Image (tube, grey):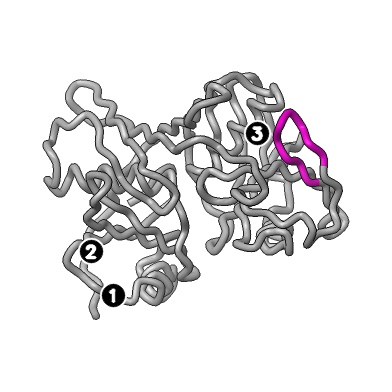
Amino acid sequence: MHGAANDFVVVDARNMERDWPKLAVAVCDRHRGIGADSLIILLNSGKADYRMRIFDADGLEAETCGNGIRCLARYIIERGLVSPDIGSMTIETIAAINKIRVERKGGKIVEFWANMGKPRFAAAEIPVDLKAGSGEVSDIKSMLAYKVVVEGTELTLNLVSMGNPHAVHFINEPVADFPLLDLGPQVENMSIFPNRANFEVARVVNKNTIEARVWERGVGETLACGSGACAIAVASKIHGYTASEVDIKLPGGVLNAAWNGVGEVVLGGPAETVFEGKWPD
């Protein structure tokens, strides 16, 4: 499945036990496996309708995934695990219990909207250990900004948690020209991030549009990232760059993020099934 080309292998694991980190590495391999950014497994939940676990291509478990949770919602509907005309459902992740709303036109599902929770800015919640780094700290409108130089490039990292850690850097040039493949792994593994971090580079096009690229922790550059789009929208809103609702244009497609400045971030976008198959044990 994929959400704006951020792709996943999805498995119904309610009656299954596996070494999920090991399986994630195998199935996500684009040359020797199926090929995906992450492995998503569906589980029963005592707190929500269902539970989701996410294992990235390196085998490490992620706290949440905005594109993945929408894909899992479609999977649940397509597998007949809920009423086919359901309007919403809840899915538990490590980070939160997320509500997903289904948007239909002419009886056909056209988009999924996920409540991604409130953004968090406290160092312990991101998490970030500023004492471990040598950058310059500045508090911008209640948001932590961390200025560093990485391989000769000055970066201002706007730090925010969407249940997982993000560092957002705004530029004035087209994001296609940014050396993300060189700087992405450097930022991901900075000593200040005890759990590593997702790195987003973004350019504000106008009050309602941002173009961006994402280096995902444990994966590398991905064509889209839901929680990353949320982090970008939050940082942009706090700085006053954009309105409360903004389209995030990523290489794989457009995601819609909305944040009123105090409540939960809502993420909208596609979720598509590509193919089904069996993985040999």
Near mark 2 (Cα within 10 A), the count class, few <14, some 14-19 or many ≥20, is some
Which quadrant would residue 20 be assigned to in this image?
bottom left
Mark found first going from the N terminus, 1 or 3: 1
**Nearer to me, 113 or 97:** 97
> Given the image, on which type of amino acid does mark 3 rest?
Ala
Q: CA distance from mark 3 to mark 2?
A: 36 Å
**Nearer to me, 21 or 118:** 118
Near mark 1 (Cα within 10 A), the count class, few <14, some 14-19 or many ≥20, is few
Mark found first going from the N terminus, 2 or 1: 2
* First to last magenta residue range: 138-146
What SS does tag 1 mark?
Answer: loop
Question: Which residue is label 2 attached to?
Answer: 13
- In the visual, does 168 lie left or right of 86? right
Q: Which mark is residue 235?
A: 3
Measuring from the top left, give residue 35's x and y in whole percent: 40, 65
Q: Contact, CB < 8 Å: mark 2 with mark 1?
A: yes
Mark found first going from the N terminus, 3 or 2: 2
